[in-house]
Amino acid sequence: MVCQHCIRAVERVLSDLNLKDFRVELGRACLKYDLPKGLMEEIEANLHKEGFEIILDHNSSLVEKTKHAILHHIRDEKEKHHNLSDCIENRLGVSYDTISRIFSVKEGRTLEKYHIAQKVERVKELLQHGEYTLSEIADMVDYSSVAHLSRQFKNVTGMTPSEYIKGKRERSGLNDV
């Protein structure tokens, strides 16, 4: 889970299965009781339909923690101006090289490409609010210029921010970002 949309989707899956007393936060869903037999498989199947998976191994857990560190880096006012690799190393206590290698193997893309895709998703989110200029958004998401933001946006989405604003405002699926 990497955003509020993800949290709501997981909450919906758990609610649809008539589960009670659960807490969902970024990267984690906690139940306050043991599950009846067979229900875990049903939860896993329903989560999979929504683009989620249950993580049990160390490297997959590290990848999820890395995704959260990247989201924190993008959204946190203090961290967004710092070097991504330093922020990830500080949050996870693992060398950037190790994390980068594991991330690439598990995700099939580089950490940097994931970081850019998440920055573009943040830009989409801010564009959808309609409250900010592109210049303000570039600053909020730590782009050096509107031109740099626009180039990366077009590379990832195939359209300019202006075209995005005028057209469909759809967010990417979980497996597409």
Image (cartoon, rainbow, N blue to C red):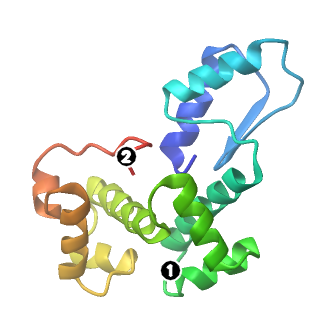
Q: Residue shown at 68%/36% (left/top)?
A: 54
Image side of residue 64 versus residue 163, left or right: right
Q: Where 24 sits versus 125, above or below?
A: above
Q: Residue shown at 58%/40% (left/top)?
A: 7
N-term-proximal mark, 1 vs 2: 1
Q: How far from the left and from the top, in percent, is residue 132? A: 27, 68
As shown in the figure, which amino acid type bears the numbered disc 2? Asp
Q: Which residue is mark 1?
A: 80
As shown in the figure, which amino acid type bears the numbered disc 1? Lys
Image side of residue 128 versus residue 108, left or right: left
Q: What SS does tag 2 mark?
A: loop
What crowding class fits label 1: few (fewer than 14 Cα within 10 Å), some (14-19), or many (20 or more)? some
Q: Where 49 sits versus 103, above or below?
A: above
Residue 69 visible in the shown view: no
Residue 19 visible in the shown view: yes
Q: Which residue is mark 2?
A: 176
Q: How far from the left and from the top, in percent, is residue 163? A: 10, 56
Residue 109 versus residue 148: which sits nearer the camera? 109
Residue 37 versus residue 73: which sits nearer the camera? 37
Q: Where 174 sits versus 99, above or below?
A: above
Q: How far from the left and from the top, in percent, is residue 107? A: 51, 54
Q: Residue shown at 17%/43% (left/top)?
A: 168
Q: Quadrant of residue 130?
A: bottom left
Q: Tell me the mark number nearer the camera, choosing from 1 and 2.
A: 2
Image side of residue 82 versus residue 37, left or right: left
Residue 137 versus residue 30: which sits nearer the camera? 30
Q: What SS does tag 1 mark?
A: loop
